[in-house]
Amino acid sequence: MKYLINTSTDPYFNMAFDEFCLQQYECDEPFFYLWRNRPAVIIGLNQNAYSEVNLPYLNGKGITLARRVTGGGAVYHDLQNMNYTIVGKDVTPEPFAAALRTLGVPAELSGRNDIFVEGRKVSGYAARVWHDRSIVHGTMMYDVDLDTLSKVLDTPGSKMEAKGISSVKSRVANLKEYLPQFPSLDELQAKLQEILSDGDEMMTMSDEQIAQIKTIAREKFASWDWIYGHSHEADLSHKRKLACGTVEARVCVDRGLITRIDFAGDFLGDLESGAVSEALKGVKYLKDDVLVVLKKMEVSRHFKGTGPEDIAELIVNQ
């Protein structure tokens, strides 16, 4: 199979690279490329960013959040995870699973877009059709930080109900334990590229095409509208003990905007909290945007002794 080389580790560029290859890169035969991302969580096309990801943990660790153009669940990538993409007519992940079997790994495609080895998930994949072409891309966990993976995809106490696609939790495993003959992911990736290409030619991209991909990455995949604004409706609930008492914020977020918010608890205040709720309707579900609204109000009169910063942090769970 023919192949491209993509050395970028920028999640936004790599999402744009996939879309460009599917829709604009001219090739009459199936082709593939192997690639990696710096630490990132990639959510599926139809997922809600707020209910699928532990955003406070992600932001605290500097982990990138990106949304792909294919469906399925959220996945964690780091530099010890290798991704593969195959583009062509009616393509499937079978060539990749077959390449792993060539190396002695008993890899099997599952019924729900995963590759399992001895009952444990080592790869998740997703697909999309565009005109007469399709794309399938997936992960390959070699030596991924499973502790970070677990924490970043865990949303304890914040998710009540969300519309859209939810991630399915499976037992996961790193392939490093099955491939002791490869001391590093670099060497394994080179071998997989050799097996998949089977002597076929490497293709290239022009500087103009790379520039186009960078523009798509910047204008679409790195944008708030794509990452958060594409999120389906979700009901979230956050509770904290503040100076005014215990406050629970029940927030409905749709397409990244607050559509309803209610406050409950034993908190004290000279004024009812309804005015705060009304003022926040239609505001982006971002701390800075919420804070701008709250600073224009006498928040401490609604939540006695409590300032705008504390209420903003409660609402967005930061």
Image (cartoon, rainbow, N blue to C red):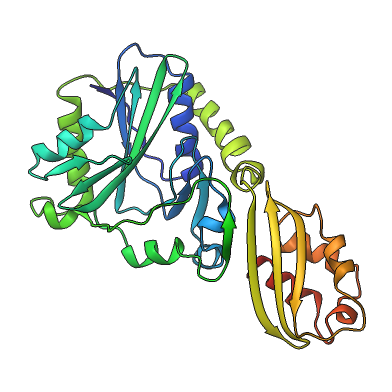
Position of 75 compared to 178: left or right?
Answer: right
Residue 72 image offset from top left, x and y in percent: 43, 42
Residue at x 49% of width, y 66% of height = 61
Which quadrant is the N terminus positioned in?
A: top left
Instruction: State whether residue 5 is above or below residue 280.
Output: above
Residue at x 91% of width, y 70% of height = 297
Position of 294 compared to 201: left or right?
Answer: right
Residue at x 68% of width, y 46% of height = 255
Q: Quadrant of residue 46?
A: top right
Which quadrant is the C terminus positioned in?
A: bottom right
Q: Mark yes or no: residue 105 visible.
A: yes
Depth order, front residue of 193/111: 111
Residue 23 image offset from top left, x and y in percent: 48, 20
Residue 21 image offset from top left, x and y in percent: 43, 24
Q: Mark yes or no: residue 141 visible.
A: no
Q: How many marks?
A: 0
Instruction: State whether residue 34 is above or below residue 57.
Output: above
Position of 144 compared to 65: left or right?
Answer: left
Instruction: State whether residue 274 is above or below residue 208.
Output: below
Residue 35 image offset from top left, x and y in percent: 34, 40
Instruction: State whether residue 159 is above or below residue 69.
Output: below
Position of 159 compared to 74: left or right?
Answer: right
Residue at x 34% of width, y 53% of height = 79
